[in-house]
Image (cartoon, grey):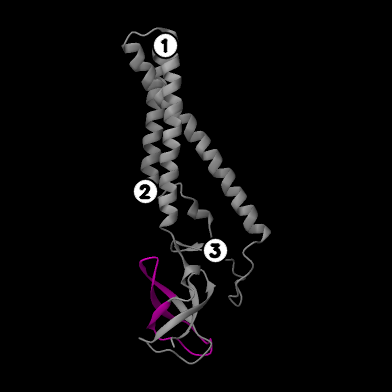
Amino acid sequence: MENLFLICAIFGSTVIVLQFVLMLLGFGHEGGHDLDAGGHDLGHDYDGHDGSVLDTDTDQNIAHHQSFSNWLFGLLSVRSVITFMAFFGLAGMAARSAEWTNLQTIVVAIAVGGAAVVLMNQIFRAIFRLRADGTVRIDHAVGLPATVYLGIPGEGRGWGKIQLMLQNRTMEYEASTPLQPLPTGTQVVVTRIVGPDRVEVQAAG
């Protein structure tokens, strides 16, 4: 039984440490499956031709979110098993070193492993929540003031660049305008999202 506890403790602890390291380095994040550009999470689909915004409640989006939910559930299930193994082994080893009976050892090991699963899942959920809250969503830029960084041709004939404050960050996006050209330094307002990192603007006021 001591060997079982030792194997569970070593294997589970090693995997848990690797999971934390990979998460801190940005691996295993769901963002790789979302439509994004440079870390800008999007709430819209784009047709890829004229930049018009499509319906956000399409069957494709629903299927995507369902797929991600299933993937996340599976990930947490595997993580739960690993967590249980690690703390089951550690608690079992501690109980055996205290010369508890086999029954006491197993009961304590199972109880500690179960409590660790609950606590560890809460920790990982908090980490995912913090990362999601920090994601910049370009669709939140509509209506915000901005400054032309590179001159924007008029009548939708080309792209310039703008800078604006979005979710307490200075962001830069390509921009076009259907009206008159907008030289560098012009104060503008974002009127429409036309792509993953592109917006439509018009002069402020």
Residue type, mark 1 in image? Gln
What type is the residue that disc 3 sits on?
Answer: Gly
Query: The N terminus appears in which quarter of the rendering?
Result: top left
Residue drawn where x is 43% and y is 42% of the image: 124
SS state under label 1: helix
| Residue 119, horizontal then vertical, whole percent | 42, 34
Q: Which residue is mark 2?
A: 25
Residue furthest right in the image: 59
Upstream in the sequence, badge 2 or badge 3? 2
Residue that mark 3 sits on: 43
Q: Would you say the magenta stretch is mainly helix, strand or loop?
A: strand
SS assignment at label 2? loop
Q: Residue furthest bottom?
A: 180
Determine crowd level at label 1: few under 14, some 14-19, many 20+ residues with C-alpha closer than 10 A.
Answer: few
Residue 10 horizontal/vertical position (percent): 37, 25
**Magenta span includes 205:** no
Residues drawn in magenta: 145-173
Q: Nearer the viewer, mark 2 or mark 3?
A: 3
Residue that mark 1 sits on: 104
Q: Is residue 68 above or below residue 175?
A: above
Crowd class of label 2 (few under 14; some 14 to 19; many from 20; radius 10 Å): few
Q: Earlier in the sequence, mark 1 or mark 3?
A: 3
- Report the amino acid beneath label 2: Leu
**Residue 169 magenta-highlighted:** yes
Q: Nearer the viewer, mark 1 or mark 3?
A: 1
Task: Pick whichever, 115 or 86, lies toward us.
Answer: 115
State the image coordinates of residue 186 (x, y, percent, origin top left): 38, 87
